[in-house]
Amino acid sequence: MTESLNGFLRRGVRAIALMIALAAPLALYAQQPEPAAPAQEATEGERRGGGEANLVLPDLDLVDVGGYGGRTLLLIGLGVSLAGVFFGLIIQKQLKDLPVHRSMLEISELIYETCKTYLVTQGKFIAILEIFIAVVIVLYFGVLSGMEPLRVIIILLFSVIGILGSYSVAWFGIRVNTYANSRTAFASLEGRPYPVYAIPLKAGMSIGMLLISIELFIMLCILLFIPREYAGPCFIGFAIGESLGAAALRIAGGIFTKIADIGADLMKIVFNIKEDDARNPGVIADCTGDNAGDSVGPSADGFETYGVTGVALITFILLAVPQEVTQVKLLVWLFVMRVMMIIASGASYLINEAMAKARYGTAAKMNFEAPLTMLVWLTSVVSVVITYVVSYVLIADLGDGTLWWMLATIITCGTLAGAIIPELVKVFTSTESSHVKEVVSSSREGGASLNILSGLVAGNFSAYWIGLGIVALMSIAYLVSASSTAMSDLMLAPAVFAFGLVAFGFLGMGPVTIAVDSYGPVTDNAQSVYELSVIEGLPNIQQELKRDFGLDVKFERAKDLLEENDGAGNTFKATAKPVLIGTAVVGATTMIFSIIVVLTDGLTQNLDKLSLLHAPFLLGLITGGAVIYWFTGASMQAVTTGAYRAVEFIKANIKLDGVEKASVADSKKVVEICTQYAQKGMFNIFLTVFFSTLAFAFLEPYFFIGYLISIALFGLYQAVFMANAGGAWDNAKKIVETELKMKNTPLHAATVVGDTVGDPFKDTSSVALNPVIKFTTLFGLLAVELAVSLSNDMGTGVSHALAGLFFAVSLVFVYRSFYGMRIGATH
C-alpha cells in the first residue's frame, strides 16, 4: 500500500522536532557552570586555535533592531515559516484532488513506488556515510577542542537533522511530482494549454515553499532556542549534515537518472520505436530517474544551498565583525530578509497566476515559457523592493547612515543575478535559441558528429557570458563595499561580506527558483505517463471520459501540448543550474575567508602565505583543477557503465510483438541496475572527496586554501559549460520532435545521440559539482583546524604522515571510480 505523504511528513516533522527538543535540554544542562575559571577556558580555546568550535552567537536581546526586539522579530519569522509549510501542503492537497484517469494514476503510483524503494536504499547508504563525518566531528570537537560529551552529542544531532532535512524535502518532492505528472497528463486531454502549464508550476511552488520554509524554520530554532554558546557549532554541524545528504542524493540521483534515460533513449534508434514506448522496460526506470535525479537532487540541493549560504554568512559575521551589537543587527536583518523573501515569492506566484489565467485560461495556444519568465522577473522586482524597505526599517542607524542602502544594493546584485542568469541560459538552451537551432541545422548534414560539436560550442560560449555576468554583478558589489568606510570600520574584509551577500541574493527568491526547476521533471514525466497509460487503446475510452469527466478528448492535441511543454521544462531546468552553482561558488568564497581568518589569527599573521610566491598555495590551486576533472570523469564513467548494462538487458528482454506494455518485473530489473551503479559511483566519489579533503588539509593549510579556491573556480566553469551544452542538445532533439515533426528519421537519430551525450553533462556531472564544492568547503572548516591542532600538539611529521595515508586511501577510491567501473571489469 502506498505510503501517504501526510503520514510521512508527520513522521519527518516529528523526527526533526524530537531532535531539536532533545538537543535543547542537553545544551541547557551542559551550560551549567564548571569548576574551571572562564579565563582558563578561553585560554584553552585559544590554544586549540579558536574558530568554529568556539563560535558564540551574540545575545539577541542585546539591542533592538529597527525599534523592534531582535528575538521578537525572529519569533514572528518562525510563524511565517510555518505558514510557508502550510502553503506548500495546501497546494500538494489541491494537486492530489485533481481529476485523473485510473490508467494514468496507476502509472504514476508505480513510478512513486520505485522512487520510494530507491530513496529507502539511498537513506541507508547516507547513514553509513554519516559515520565517517561523525568520526571527524567527535575527534575535532570532542578530543581536540576539549568539548564535554553533551556538547558533542548536540552537534552530532544537528548534523543528523541536516541529513533528515535534505532527505525529507527530497521525499516530499517526489511525492508531489508523482501526483502532478498524472494530473498534467490527464489535463492535456481537453486540448487546452493552460492546465498543462499550471499543474507543474503548482507542484514546483509546493516544493519550493515547503523546502525553504522548513530550512528557515530549523535555522531559526537553532538561533532562538539553542544556548548561544552552542548555536555556532550546531549551525556548522547542521550545514555539514545537509551538505552530506544533498551531495549523496545529487550524485547518486544524477547517475541513476542518466543511466535510465540513455538506456531508454537508445532503444528509439535500435528498434525504431516511439518516445516512451510502453513496451520498453527502460521507460519506467527513466521516469523514476526523472524524480531521483531531476526532483530529489534539486530539492536536496536547494535545501542545502539555502542553508549553507546562511551558515557561511553567520560564520563570517561571528569571526569578522568584532562588535557584538553589530553582530546582532546584521544577523537579525539577514533572517528577517529571508522571512520576507518567502512572503515575496508566495505573493508573486499568486499575482502571476492570476495574470496568466486571465491571459491564457481559455486560449488555444500559449508560449509555455512566457508566464514562467514573468514569474521569475516579477519575484525579482518584488524582492528588490522588499530588500530596500526592510534594510531601511531595520538597519538605517547602522554605521554612518548610508550602510542600509549599500547593503541592500549588494543583495540586489544577487537577486538580479537570479533573473539575469536564467535569461543568459535561455540564449543557449531554449527551443527559441539560435544556438539550439544551429545544433539542429548542423545535424541535418553532419549527423551526430556536428550535432555534438555545435553543442560543445554553445556550452563554451555560455560559460564565457555567464562568467562575465557573475563577475559584473560581483564587481558592482565590490565597488559598493569599497566605497563605504562604514563597512571597513565595522568588519574585516568588507568585500568578502559583499560577495557573501551576493550569494544570499541569488537565493532571495528561493521558492520560485526551485519551482521553475521542479517544473521540468513533471513535464517530462507527464509525457511518459501519457504513453505508458496506453489510454488511447483502452476500450470505449472516449465514451468513458465523456461520461465520467465531461471531456471531449483530443488525443493528438494532448500529445503535442505535452511535448511542447516538455521543451519549456527542459529550458527552465537548465536555468536553475547556473544559479545554484553560482551560489555555491560565491558562498564558498565567504566560507573560505572564514578559514583564512582562523588560520591568520584575524588577518594579523601569515598573510604572505596566501600568495603565488608561497609554493604550497600555488600547488593547491593546480590540485583543485585536477580533482574537478577527476570528478567529471568518474561520474560519467558510472553513467557509461551503468547505461551499457541497462542497454544490454533491455535489448535482450524487450518484446515488441503481441504485448502492449513491458512486464513490471523487467522494468524493476532496469531500476535495480540503475540503483546498483548509482550507489557504486556515489560511494567511490564520496569517499574520494572525503579522504582527499582530509589529505590536503593535513598536508599544509595554505595548500588547502589554494585547493578550495581552485575547485570553486574550476567547478563553476566546468558546471556551466556542461549544463548548457547538455541543455542545447536536449532541446535540439525537442525541436526535431515537436516543431519539425521528424521522429524516426536520420535527423532525429542524430539529435538523440547528441542528447545522450548531453544527459550526463547536464544532469550528472555539472549539477553534482555544486554540493561537492560546498561539502568540501564546509568539511574543510573542521578538517583544516583538526590538522592544525594535531600539528601543534604532535608535530608536522605526524600531520604529513596522516596526509600521506589519507591520500593513499583516496587513490584507492579514485582507482575504483575508473578502473573498477570499467565495462569489462564489471561484467
Image (cartoon, rainbow, N blue to C red):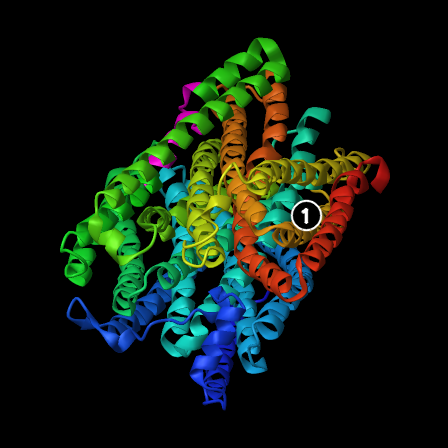
Query: Residue 359: x and y, percent?
Result: 25, 38
Residue type at numbered disc 1:
Ile
For the point 63% across and 30% down, which residue is it?
756
Query: Residue 617: x and y, percent?
Result: 55, 42
In the image: residue 647, left or right of residue 207: right
For the point 58% across and 66% down, which residue is it?
3
Q: Is residue 122 visible?
A: yes
Query: Residue 494: x and y, percent?
Result: 31, 50
In the image: residue 695, left or right of residue 617: right
Q: Is residue 692 magenta?
A: no
**In this figure, what is the number of numbered marks?**
1
In the image: residue 626, left or right of residue 337: right
**Location of the C terminus (image quadrant):** top right
Q: Is residue 368 visible?
A: no
Identify residue for label 1.
685
- Occupied quadrant, residue 478: top left
**Location of the N terminus (image quadrant):** bottom right
Q: Is the residue marked by circle 1 packed among few (<14), some (14-19), or many (20+) residues within 10 Å?
A: many
- The stretch of residues the image draws in magenta is 419-434
Query: Residue 564: x and y, percent?
Result: 45, 32
Question: Toward the viewer: 624 or 337?
Answer: 624
Quick one: SS at disc 1? helix
Quick one: which residue is furthest to the top in this view?
Answer: 445
- Placement of 366 over or under 398, stated as above or below: above
For the point 35% across and 51% down, which residue is it?
504
